[in-house]
Image (cartoon, rainbow, N blue to C red):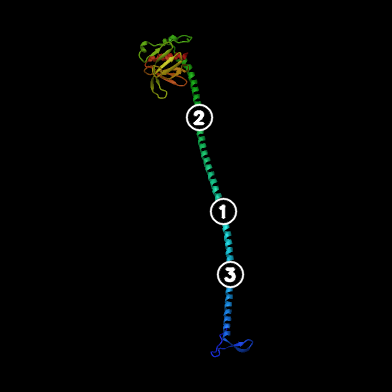
């Protein structure tokens, strides 16, 4: 603002220099007021211009901030899209890993099933091999037993020939060259007094019956059995009792190799043995007379 001019209270005049170095002229109160108004308008105009400039600067700054915010928002959207793509890729990767894990689990279960099947097959194969080994061993044992029985039969047959020529002594009723087709077993009967009682021997033309004591094949105990020797059936059969209902065993007369009498120190000849290729029957009689009858009858049958 211009310096305030000095005023005079008497004249109310203001000396103002004239432009261009002209002499001062007097300014009235109205001029001063107009000048103040002009100055005030000028000041307001300057302030408004400054405010306009500041507003324009702030507007430009706001535009810059808006542009920067738009750029940052665009960048943020780009980052969000990139993050979404990465999340989708990660989800696909996790799904692929899940599928691979499921396939791996299925493959592991398949391998476990194959392993169990292999173990079962191995166990079955081992059982079959053990069974085959047992069958082979049994067959070998059977073959060896058959060979042993064949050898024993051969030995017994050779011994039979020797025993037939040395052991068998026919009774006087059989002293002839040609052996008849039928033998009368009654001619072998011992004296009646030696065969009396329930343990005696019953004889007729074709059958010899009586009790004998037999040594068990498995349990080595002596058991009383009822024996029947028949010329009709060509068999020596024994039963549990004399009713001949429960048959316990027997042997074909053709299989008997020899009949051997056992001699004891007290000369009580009550034990004899019937030998076959498969087993030997150990027999006892209640007295020596019955033993002699059985031995003579059996030897006579073996000689046929």
Residue lying farthest bottom?
Answer: 10
Q: Nearer the viewer, residue 243 or 16?
A: 16
Q: Secondary structure at mark 3?
A: helix
Q: CA distance from mark 2 to mark 1?
A: 69 Å
Q: Position of residue 231 (x, y in %)?
A: 45, 13
**Residue 28 position by quadrant:** bottom right
Picture residue at 57% right of the left edge, 59% below the top: 77
The circle on residue 105 is none
The circle on residue 88 is 1
Residue 235 visible in the picture: yes
Q: Which quarter of the image is occupied by the N terminus? A: bottom right
Q: Position of residue 175 (x, y in %)?
A: 45, 9
Question: How many labels, in total?
Answer: 3
Q: How crowded is the residue under tag 3: few (<14 C-alpha within 10 Å), some, or many (20+)?
A: few
Q: Secondary structure at mark 2?
A: helix
Which of disc 1 and disc 2 is earlier in sequence?
A: 1
The residue tagged 2 is 135
Q: Nearer the viewer, residue 46 or 191?
A: 46
Which of disc 2 and disc 3 is earlier in sequence?
A: 3
Q: Nearer the viewer, residue 49 or 140?
A: 49
Q: Secondary structure at mark 1?
A: helix
Q: Is residue 130 above or below residue 6?
A: above
Q: How crowded is the residue under tag 2: few (<14 C-alpha within 10 Å), some, or many (20+)?
A: few
The residue tagged 3 is 59
């Amino acid at each position: 603002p211009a310096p305030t001019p000095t005023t005079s209270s008497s004249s109310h005049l203001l000396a103002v220099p004239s432009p261009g170095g002209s002499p001062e002229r007097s300014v009235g109160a109205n001029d001063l007021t107009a000048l103040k108004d002009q100055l005030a308008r000028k000041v307001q105009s300057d302030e408004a211009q400054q405010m306009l400039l500041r507003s324009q600067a702030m507007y430009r700054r706001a535009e810059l901030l808006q542009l920067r915010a738009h750029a940052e928002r665009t960048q943020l959207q780009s980052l969000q899209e990139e993050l979404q793509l990465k999340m989708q890729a990660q989800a696909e990767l996790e799904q692929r890993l899940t599928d691979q894990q499921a396939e791996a689990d299925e493959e592991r279960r398949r391998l476990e099933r194959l392993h169990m099947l292999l173990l079962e097959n191995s166990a079955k194969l081992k059982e079959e091999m053990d069974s085959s080994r047992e069958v082979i061993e049994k067959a070998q044992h059977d073959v060896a037993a058959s060979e042993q029985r064949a050898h024993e039969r051969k030995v017994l047959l050779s011994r039979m020939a020797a025993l037939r020529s040395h052991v068998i002594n026919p009774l006087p009723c059989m002293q002839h060259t040609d052996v008849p087709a039928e033998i009368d077993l009654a001619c072998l009967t011992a004296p009646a007094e030696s065969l009396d009682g329930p343990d005696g021997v019953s004889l007729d033309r074709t059958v010899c019956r009586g009790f004998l004591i037999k040594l068990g094949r498995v349990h080595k105990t002596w058991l009383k059995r009822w024996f029947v020797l028949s010329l009709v059936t060509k068999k020596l059969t024994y039963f549990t009792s004399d009713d001949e209902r429960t048959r316990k065993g027997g042997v074909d007369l053709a299989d008997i190799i020899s009949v051997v009498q056992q001699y004891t120190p007290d000369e009580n000849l009550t034990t004899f043995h019937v030998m076959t290729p498969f087993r030997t029957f150990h027999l006892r009689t209640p007295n020596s007379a019955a033993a002699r009858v059985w031995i003579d009858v059996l030897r006579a049958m073996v000689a046929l």
